[in-house]
Image: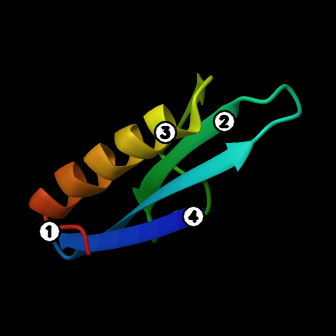
Amino acid sequence: MKISMSRVVNAKERYYKIELIPNLFGEVLLIRTFGSLNRLKPTGVIRQTYNDVQEAMAIMNALIHAKAKRGYE
């Protein structure tokens, strides 16, 4: 599952991507990528591993809610 969000800050467009990927060990990898659309490389990439799919989904939903409160659509 992959979610992309964006917002405009000081006339610059920012993006935030959240992605859930199952790995070969039965775990779920949550990858958060964020940065500016004006740059080729992302500003940051955060990778977290979870043993439970429900826990990863709960964290993902909390992140989506927090980013929506900050103006991302």
**Mark linked to residue 2:** 4
Q: CA distance from mark 1 to mark 4?
A: 26 Å
Dot 3: what SS?
helix
The location of residue 66, given as percent across then percent down, is 19, 49
The disc labelled 3 sits on which kind of residue?
Gln
Q: Which residue is mark 3?
A: 54
The disc labelled 4 sits on which kind of residue?
Lys
**Sequence order check: which comes first, mark 4 or mark 3?**
4
Circles 1 and 4: CB atoms closer than 8 Å: no
Q: CA distance from mark 1 to mark 3?
A: 36 Å
* Mark 2 or 1: the one toward you: 2
- Name the image quarter holding residue 28: top right
The disc labelled 1 sits on which kind of residue?
Asn
Residue at 43 percent of width and 55 percent of height? 35
Residue at 37 percent of width and 69 percent of height? 5
Q: Which residue is mark 2?
A: 28
Q: CA distance from mark 4 to mark 3?
A: 16 Å
- Mark 2 nearby-residue class (10 Å; few <14, some 14–19, many ≥20): many
Q: Which residue is mark 1?
A: 10
Circles 1 and 3: CB atoms closer than 8 Å: no
The location of residue 34, given as percent across then percent down, is 44, 52
